[in-house]
Image (tube, grey):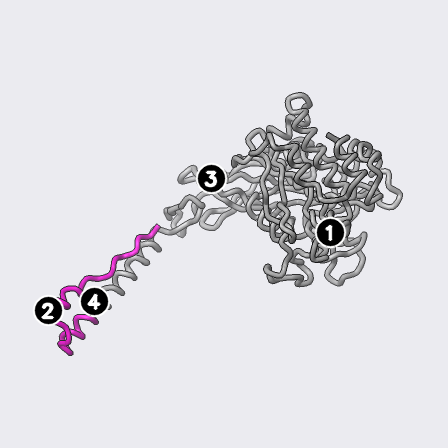
Amino acid sequence: MLTFLQNLYAHTFKLCLPIIYSLFEGLHDHVISIGKSVNGFALLVIEISDKPGQSESEPAFKFIGNVHGDEPVGREVLIKLANWLCDNYLKDPLATLIVENMHLHILPTMNPDGFALRRRGNANNVDLNRDFPDQFFPINDEINYRQPETRAIMNWVKQEHFTASASLHGGALVANYPWDGSRDQSKQYYGCPDDKTFRYMASVYSQSHYNMSLSKEFNGGITNGAFWYPIYGGMQDWNYIHGGCFELTLEISDVKWPKAAELPVIWEHNRMSMLNLAASLVKTGVHGRIFAADTGHPIPGSLMIKGIDSEIRASRTYGDYHRMLAPGENYEVMASMEGFKTKATRILLEEEAVSLDFILDPDGADGQMKMLRNNCGCLCDNDKLFHVQGAHLELYLFVLLVVVALYVLFKRKTSSKFTTQRHSPKRPIAV
């Protein structure tokens, strides 16, 4: 497979996605489209799991390549990664762990138009890694002004509930982590609330790489984005803030357009880094589910770590959460949800992941408030439902009395019409 890609890469830089994805035509359930580029090319994602397309209480990781059209190495390496995992499932322990314990999503190219044009931006010549909403400066706050590739990623993140991710770039050799910018736009170290965890994740990639950690420019082969050079509208900061997704920006090749003969070497240098980073989702961190004590049903509560100003949400279907944390620390973990009492417990996170479930008690004034829950985990107070229904009933009776009074006063209606009007409207059913 790599030989095919090398030859294709060596002789042409024209768009070749239909050819590449035909390699996966035997895995129809594994390939989906999350949207289209400006020029109408599908943004195709390969999902690798023992149960692709099915919802499970497992963490999800995504790799994205070719964000910049003139940085094609990521797309080649990600195609090889997908092929390697499929070939080595049940043969290699790391491949088996990834396939059976998580959902891995691979988008080899976010910018097929830019790749076809051999330029950084998309078909509208917009840098997609400057097109996301930014926390410090409003950039394209109106979603209709964002590029279709950007909107596709945003909708995808909101739909899939990713735990962590990485985008692959070219032109340097370093693992970059948030924040990507600073409030005053100056070049400085500007760490996010999970700075320690991000440094751990970046180090997992760098230390597993053939020579990234030996960098003379970047200590340990990792860097804070704002300390390297500030950018605004970047994808990794948006993922962390709005998706609860811990994303790294990985520069995997000093040369943007290396020779075809160098592709096998770049793949081998990055293979263990990509595998170890993805596997870290199940090898470390804290994982569990959140339940309601009175019903035993899973609920989409929030999980926070004391002293870290960020939270993640449990899934609506299973109430499962997956929280990346740097190992070797004590943490106080707190679970909460509206209508329930918050619970907290301390854990010692060593080199292995910690499993921790929460059972939350309903939070009523008298401790006995009963709640109705719909399938989405929404909460409704029984008493409030009763009052709403009572309010509607009183309104209908009032309207009926007004109609009767008008009849008596003005005598404009016949007896038959009066009989028709006196029926009150159908009452809504509260759900």
Q: Looking at the picture, which amino acid does disc 2 mark?
A: Ser
Tell me if residue 389 is in the magenta stretch.
Answer: no
Q: Residues within 10 Å of mark 3 (few under 14, many from 20)?
A: many
Q: Residue at x 12, y 71 (%)?
A: 414
Q: Which mark is residue 400?
A: 4
At numbered mark 4, what does the secondary structure look like: helix, strand or loop? helix
Q: Which mark is residue 191?
A: 1
As rendered, which of 255 and 249 lies closer to the eye? 255
At numbered mark 2, what does the secondary structure look like: helix, strand or loop? helix
Looking at the rendered image, the disc whose residue lies closer to the viewer, 2 or 4, is 2
In the rendered image, residue 359, in percent from the top left (x then y), is placed at 48, 39
Q: Residue at x 45, y 49 (%)?
A: 339
Q: Which mark is residue 298?
A: 3
Q: Magenta region: which residues?
A: 402-431
In the rendered image, residue 45, in percent from the top left (x then y), is placed at 62, 40
Q: Looking at the picture, which amino acid does disc 4 mark?
A: Leu
Q: Residues within 10 Å of mark 4 (few under 14, many from 20)?
A: some
In the rendered image, residue 27, in percent from the top left (x then y), is placed at 59, 31
Question: How far is the residue under mark 2 from the one under mark 4?
Answer: 16 Å
Q: Is residue 58 left or right of residue 279?
A: left
Tell me if residue 408 is in the magenta stretch.
Answer: yes
Q: Looking at the picture, which amino acid does disc 3 mark?
A: Pro
